[in-house]
Image: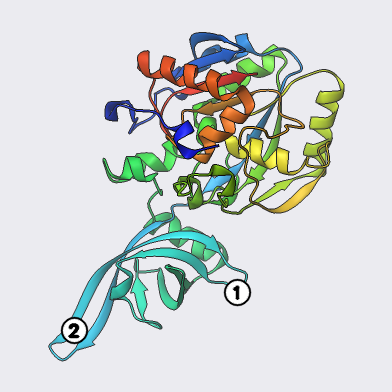
Amino acid sequence: MKLSDFDFHLPEDRIATRPASPRSSARLLVADGDAISDAHVFDLPNWLKPGDRLVLNDTRVIPARLNGRRHRDSAQGPVSAAIEATLLDPQANGTWASLIKPLKKVKLGEDIQFSDQLSASLERVEDGQAYLRFNLSGDDFDAALEQAGAMPLPPYIAAKRPADEQDKTDYQTIWARNSGAVAAPTASLHFDEALIQALGERGIVFTHVTLHVGAGTFLPVKVEDVTTHKMHAEWGSVSAAAAQEIRETKAAGGRVIPVGTTALRLIESAARSGQIEPWEGETDIFIYPGFKFHVTNALMTNFHLPKSTLLMLVSALMGQERMRNVYAHAIEQNYRFFSYGDASLLIP
């Protein structure tokens, strides 16, 4: 299975830099077997059946991109340098794994001042990542980060415009509650209160799980033989109640439909035995064609990058030829792509 099997040409103008407003007015491509239909996200209740269960990732994106300055005394007097940091993962020892630009401008032990309240010192550097120890922790850290930080927009949006205050709303799901992600579960960004209410009235039920999406979700695949690619690990949790709800839906003949690839990867991680069980820990599950799904019956997801592990995942669910047809249709019909783009409902 070659990386080139998952390539396609996407015109630059199809990359969305702002979401649809209202959220549920985004377009929805429905691929039901071989049939392709064009709809809108607010039509989702029409495509689902009473008793279907949507699985929602309730992770909360932290404003993980920080701009600060490093100050230093030199022979010429005080000097400073602008430093950009992107937080990646909190470590067990209290530091944060981070990407710093430019890393060569900061020495071990030096402080970077991000705001009047928030600063951090560089403790170590390993494999190109910087490990920062902040001056605050707990709720004080969260509050200072909320003030100083910007949303960590994906590289393909950040290259076109900087993050702003609007992104703090736009790049967060309406049910976000467990802080820890540095990227949003973007399929969930299409849901608003009106859609949740309409789904409930249709008899659709919901289960919440948590997967803290990491920056590794944007890392390119660099090996031509995709089966040798090593996935980044992300922390997730499926509660006993969530596992029970999903089992009951399966037993009753309902469909389990994760909203987003993150929710899908998590519930399939928790179901490697063949049946979903309560689960907590780090998952580096890699889903590509040939994967055996144990709980997923369909998937709602956005449109993904060429040669990405997420395109491999949807190809595993639907088949490679079918996904090629879906993406060709989406490009031809001017669907908007990637994190702030339109959505698809994929029913094998």
Q: Residue 23 in the image: state x and y as whole percent.
A: 46, 24
Indicate the amino acid at tag 2. Pro
Q: Residue at x 49, y 66 (%)?
A: 97
Q: Residue 25 in the image: state x and y as whole percent.
A: 44, 18
Q: Is residue 180 left or right of residue 294?
A: left
Q: Residue 49 in the image: state x and y as whole percent.
A: 71, 12
Give the residue at the far left of this rendering. 76
Q: Residues within 10 Å of mark 2 (few under 14, many from 20)?
A: few
Residue 193 visible in the picture? yes
State the SS at label 2. Answer: strand
Inter-mark Cα distance, 2 to 1: 32 Å
Q: Residue at x 82, y 24 (%)?
A: 250
Rendering colour mode: rainbow
Q: Residue at x 50, y 26 (%)?
A: 190
Q: Is residue 334 left or right of residue 93?
A: left
* Residue at which label 2 appears: 78
* Residue at which label 1 appears: 93
Q: Residue at x 45, y 64 (%)?
A: 98
Residue 174 visible in the picture? no
Nearer the N terminus, badge 2 or badge 1?
Answer: 2
The residue lying toward the viewer, choosing from 318 and 136, is 318
Q: Quadrant of the C terminus?
A: top right
Q: Quadrant of the N terminus?
A: top right
State the SS at label 1. Answer: loop
Q: Tell me which corner region of the image, top left, top right, bottom left or bottom right, holds residue 242.
A: top right
Q: Tell me which corner region of the image, top left, top right, bottom left or bottom right, holds residue 92.
A: bottom right
CB under 8 Å between callouts 2 and 1? Answer: no
